[in-house]
Image: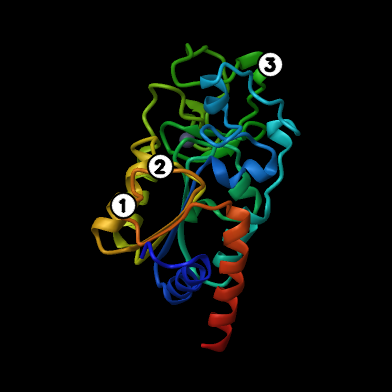
Amino acid sequence: MFFMNLEEKINLAAKWIAESERLVVFTGAGCSTGSGIPDFRGPDGLWTRRDKGLAPKKPKVPWDQAKPNPNHYAIAELMEMGRLNYLISQNIDGLHAKSGIPFEMLAELHGNQFFMKCLSCNKKMLFEEAKWDKKIWGRGFRKDPVREDQPTCPHCGGRIINSIVDFGDPLPYDELQESMIRSQNSDVFLVIGSSLVVTPAANMPGIANQNGAKLIIINKGDTPYDMVTDIKFDDKIEDVLPPIMEKVKEMTKSS
Ligand code: ZN
């Protein structure tokens, strides 16, 4: 597949997506840089700059006010077209949910900055819904001490914690399980903007690929799956995803 030019790759990726029955999309930080949220290993990424001894670039907008960008809306469009089986994201910015993807179709493997979750019933709720004031109760991480009078789950009374997966914390078990099953059963697996190095989230493309899914990766920069992927776009997402979407729409309209 490495001999194809960009246009041929776009056409083939679009064909696979248009014909897919169980498309799983996987997103990383690169999906959100267009919303002003810095990634880790991109040209201006947090860790790229750190390795060069540079301070992080000042974000254009505060993280909690960032809005979904065309990448997020393209995925939401795939859902509206009935093409999306499941979405797995490493991002905690909550932008997929903001773009209209329901939690039943979304695994936020590293959490969502706007949500807490209950350790007993697993329900997610906004900090406001949980009546959790960060000024009083702190950020509510799993390792924080539990205070006797802190708010509990409005549904079951269980302990609620910040849904963001902090260093050393386990990933949300149910979403991780669901992600593995959906990846295993997928027929096309599309990676958007991830260098696929943070495991276990980054194991999903391998699980899909080993079970026969066609693997498409859009990421500027290398990934550990570059040698096994069916199509690799080493391009900016903005240069590849819109033309793919256009073709998918054409193809699904005529069929
Ligand atoms: Zn609960």
Judge by depth and name the residue closer to the eye, 144 or 84. 84
Dot 1 amino acid type = Met
- Residue 230 image point, x, y percent: 35, 62
The CA span between labels 3 and 1 is: 48 Å
Q: Quadrant of residue 138?
A: top right
Label placed on residue 135 = 3
The CA span between labels 2 and 3 is: 35 Å
Dot 3 amino acid type = Lys
Mark 2 and mark 3 lie on one chain; the one further toward the N terminus is 3
- Specify few, some or many for label 1: CA neighbours under 10 Å numbering under 14, 14-19, or 20 or more: few
The residue positioned 56% from the left and 68% from the top of the image is: 244
The residue positioned 39% from the left and 65% from the top of the image is: 3
Dot 2 amino acid type = Leu
Mark 3 lies on a secondary structure that is: helix
Mark 3 and mark 1 lie on one chain; the one further toward the N terminus is 3
- The verdict on label 3 being within 8 Å of ligand 1 is no
The residue positioned 68% from the left and 49% from the top of the image is: 68
